[in-house]
Image (cartoon, coloured by chain):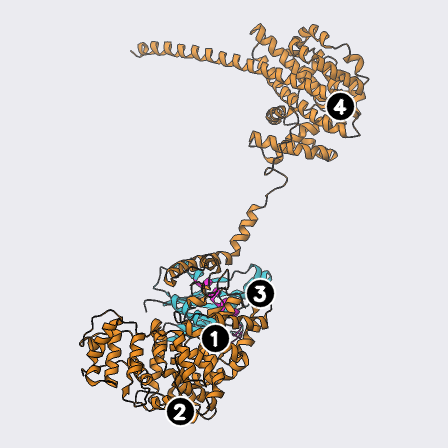
Chain colours: A orange, B cyan
Amino acid sequence: MESLTLTDVEQKYYSDLFVYCDTDNTKKVASNGRVLDLFRAAQLPNEVVLQITELCGATRLGHFGRSQFYIALKLIAVAQSGLPLRVESLNSVKDLPLPRFVVAKNEQEARHTALYPDLENQGSYQGVIPRPPGRGQIKKVSAHEVIQPCLPTVEPQPDTTSPVVSPHQSPPTSPHAWRKHKRQASGGNLERPPVVVAGAVWTPFREAQSGPVVTGDGMWSAHSPPPVQESWVSLKDTHPPSSSTLPPMHPSSVQVENSSIRTLASATTANEIQRQSSSGYDDPWKITDEQRQYYINQFKTIQPDLNGFIPGSAAKEFFTKSKLPILELSHIWELSDFDKDGALTLDEFCAAFHLVVARKNGYDLPEKLPESLMPKLIDLDDSAEVPDQATDVGYSGSPVEVTPNKSPSMPSLNQTWPDLNQGNEQWETFSERSSSSQTLTQFDSNIAPADPDTAIVHPVPIRMTPSKIHMQEMELKRTGSDHTHPTSPLMVKPPELSEETKLATSMKFLNCYLFMWTCDGYSSSDSYTSDQDPITSIVARQRSHSGTSPEGLKVVAAPPPPPPRPHASHSRSSSLDMNRTFAAVSTGPQQAGGVAYPPAVPPRPLPTQTSGPHSGHRSDEGLAAHSTTSPQQIPEQPNFADFSQFQAFAASDQPGDDGEKHAESLPVRPGPLRTMKSESQEERANATAKGPIMAPPPKPVRRRLKSEDELQDETLPPKSNVIATVLATQPSIPRSVGKDKKAIQASIRRNKETNTVLARLNSELQQQLKDLLEERISLEVQLEQLRPFSHL
Amino acid sequence: MAVCIAVIAKENYPLYIRSVPTQNELKFHYTVHTSLDVVEEKISAVGKAMADQRELYLGLLYPTEDYKVYGYVTNSKVKFVIVVDSSNTSLRDNEIRSMFRKLHNSFTDVMCNPFYNPGDTIQSKAFDGMVSAMMVQAS
């Protein structure tokens, strides 16, 4: 026979197999029957088997000696790995996987029942280990066997130990179990005196295991997890010197496991687990259905709701019963608490329990949670356990990343690793962001509106009827006028704003809208006040001047403090009408408005005609409001305004008077403003119609004033309209709504007329400018033409 | 990138301290111990604001010629101290912050473990793994 070098693993494996096959207990020759069965289990073609038997020399000998058996096993391994069968390959092939022998379960059970009725429980699980105790002895004697010689003493107690041992079988596959049994056996032997029972359990198990190694190996080598093997191997190495070299953990764990398992598990369920575990040979960490059911039952004892959590404290108590060291329990917890919430879901609990059982059976805890133990998000299907990321480090299971990955069909852990690693990073960043609450708070603070007073953020464009546009225009002009009228009583009016809170609020929004629309650079407060001022001022003036109305009626040249708007138009005759109308439109208290301008120049025909009815209307209103003004205003009807056209001209030559009158009229009511505006329109119309008859400079001046007035007019009337509408609701202002509407419409028309007039004026001025520029250019050209000569 | 990482409990005894083994570990232990004074000083500096406004990240506690010491305090007065080599100039403040954040997260996970008694030394493998990742790889 060629020399055969076997690794320790192989040695052990082969020896176990040999023992298994050594049904005759000859210790030297493996029964052909068994061997052939074994070879058949190797799932190799018959030709290969024959070749192997030939190669190993069994055919020569007629039987399988130990060496032949070993060679045969090695050749089987070679064949299974797809390598050609060569004698040389026996030693040349490195890292050859152990030969795999697949055994049907029925076969296992049959063997079990036939051979090992005592250890039925275990046998069922072992199935593959139907080895009578006697074999154990033989095995024990074998040099390769690490099993301690204490076997015989333990043998008589297989029954008592079987139930205890059963739980140990629960974890994965028999090979593992076998391995662990080795450990356990040694451990049991260590603790001989106190753990006789355990030892008894171990040893018979070991025996049983060694027998069915064939079948067990099938599963065993199927997955051959290196760590377990290594640990097993290392353990095996420690065996020969003395069992005492075993880590104390194992014996203690063994004992602990025994007792704890008794407390924890029922024999039946344990048996079930064992049976189940024997079938789950694909994944060492896979939880079988029976196991899972057992875990679920245990879960229910703590937490009746399967969808609920087991708090950490309860879980701690529960798992502490397993008598595992706290450090290991802590590690198990770290592995199983997938979402790091301090509580265990059903999946997490099952994983933890599984790990505990595995640990008790001697398996080392993995560094990372195995795939099959990953908690699933959706269902409890055992076979569909998802290979999610292992709980590595404190990055936790990144539940954010896990949940999407939790699908029953995630096969490869490797694929998920990088994903989860990235997920970890994302999780880290997420947690980093979350931990930096400062940024959040800062952000929140930025959201808060800076100044509610400005109300710029939410401009409520209150549609103040068609006057909104007018309001905007008024706002434009109004703001412009504000600057030109430093003595703007409008600014003084703010204190009176309190009187009209309702109006203020409504106007505020309007102002805001206007403000936004105009995008003026005016400060919010300014615009606000400015916006509100005209309105409020109008109202205020109307109200404030109510007291002066009686006087205003009489006063002609010396009205109350002149407003910033010189209502030149007020000096017109028509302004009286307007005054009346405005007086009527505006607040009731307004009384002196119209009266204050007896010498008001009658409005121009155009505006007056258009606005006549309005003015008349307003005058009516004014009449209603101020009876004193009526006698003066009545005669100033639109028709009458025609005649006053010249007077308007005359008045237009007197900007000062106009201003006065404007000033007078302004504080009174918007009516006068209207008239002023109309007057200005008249002036302009006249100016445009008659050409530069009127001195252009004065016109611009007048126009300026009037423009301001108009602005004020235009701004005020709409606002007065607004005020009218608003004030109409106020009981303190006795006015008829109908008249207000008419006044508003009149003011609208007047504004439009003013607009057209202004536009015309603008175009004319532009034209003049162009002409002048051309003249200048021509002059310059001439000059230059002359100059060169001069230079010469 | 750190040379030494330490977790100190509220009572100022170390829960976990680990340094690059090649160097004189005792020196780092001493450094961490002295840094506690600076940490206390920074904690007490806030006064009325209490922990609400006190930032967890303390920043550079004090530099020496060889290395720099950074501090981080949790709301439960558990301190994290990181000692980095001064020659490693590439480390920015954000990186140090992220390291502390990871430490804090890992520490939280350790705390969540019901088998961990607060006050015990941290023996979590996950925590060790995370710290190892942060230690100086070059060494």
User: Dot 4, crowdedness within 10 Å: few (<14), some or many (≥20)?
Assistant: some
A383 is higher (above) or lower (below) than A4? above
Instruction: Read off the magenta span.
Output: B99-121
Say if B50 sits above or below A217 in the image: above
Q: Amino acid at mark 3?
A: Gly
Q: Helix, strand, or loop for circle 2?
A: helix
For the residues tagged 1 and 3, is the chain the same?
A: yes
Side (left or right) of A251 relative to A685: left
Q: How many marks can you see? A: 4
Secondary structure mostly seen in the magenta stretch = helix
Element at label 3: loop
Task: Give whichever of A713, B123 is nearer the camera.
Answer: B123
Q: Which residue is mark 4?
A: A737
Of the image marks 2 and 4, the number of the one nearer the N terminus: 2
- N-term mark: 3 or 4: 3
Determine the CA span between mark 3 and mark 2. Answer: 47 Å
Q: Chain of mark 1?
A: A
Residue at the disc numbered 1? A273
Q: Is residue B23 visible?
A: no
Q: Is residue A763 above or below residue B110?
A: above
Label 3 and label 4 in one chain: yes
* Disc 3 crowd, CA 10 A, few/some/many (<14, 14-19, 20+): some
Left or right: A417, with A634 as reference point:
left
Query: Is residue B100 found inside the magenta-colored segment of the image?
Result: yes
Kind of element beneath mark 1: helix
What is the C-alpha distance between the residues marked 1 and 3?
A: 24 Å
Sequence-wise first label, 4 or 1: 1
x then y, percent, for residue A28: 27, 89
Report the residue marked by disc 3. A308
Q: Are marks 2 and 4 in contact (CB under 8 Å)?
A: no
Label 2, on which residue?
A151
